[in-house]
Image (spheres, rainbow, N blue to C red):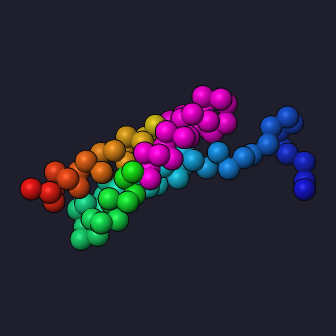
Amino acid sequence: MPEPIVPGRTDTPAVALGPTALVLGVLSALWPWVPVFPLALLAGPLAVVFGVAGMHHAGQGVGRMGTAAAGTALGAAGFVGVFFLFVP
C-alpha cells in the first residue's frame, strides 16, 4: 500500500459519509417532485443517518462537517416533503 500524501493521516471510509449524505439529501429533496417519490422515502432517512454519522466523525477530525450537515438537512427536508405532498 502506498504511503499517505499527508503524513500521519490516512483516509478512512468515514470521509465519504458527508458527500454521500449530501448526494442522497439532494436526491431526496428533488425526487418528490418527479414520479419516483418512493425512492425519496428511502433516500431521505439514509441521508439523515449518513449525515449524522458524518458529523460525528467530522467532530473527531475525519471528514467535513459542512457536507454532512447539509446532507442531513436536505435529507430531512426531502423526507418531510414527501409526507406534505403525498400523504393526506
Residue at horizontal 64%, vertical 45%? Answer: 14
Q: Which residues are magenta?
A: 46-66
Residue at horizontal 32%, vertical 59%? Answer: 41
Residue 51 belongs to magenta span: yes
Count of numbered marks: 0
Image quadrant holding the N terminus, namely bottom right
Residue sticking out furthest to the left:
88
Residue 27: tell me if it is visible.
no
Image quadrant holding the C terminus, namely bottom left
Query: In the image, residue 25 lies at what x, y percent?
Result: 40, 51
Residue at horizontal 49%, vertical 39%? Answer: 52
Residue at horizontal 37%, vertical 53%? Answer: 44
Dividing the picture into quadrants, the one containing residue 18 is top right
Dividing the picture into quadrants, the one containing residue 61 is top right
Query: In the image, residue 76 lies at what x, y percent?
Result: 34, 44
Residue 7: tell me if it is visible.
yes
Query: In the image, residue 66 lies at what x, y percent?
Result: 50, 36
Is residue 14 toward the left or the right of residue 70 in the image?
right
> Which is the main secondary structure of the residues drawn in magenta?
helix
Q: In the rendered image of this protein, does residue 70 appear above or below residue 38?
A: above
Is residue 68 toward the left or the right of residue 59 in the image?
left
Q: In the rendered image of this protein, does residue 23 appear above or below residue 68?
A: below
Residue sticking out furthest to the bottom:
35
Residue sticking out furthest to the right:
2
Q: In the rendered image of this protein, does residue 61 appear above or below residue 71?
A: above
Query: In the image, residue 7 lies at what x, y percent?
Result: 87, 36
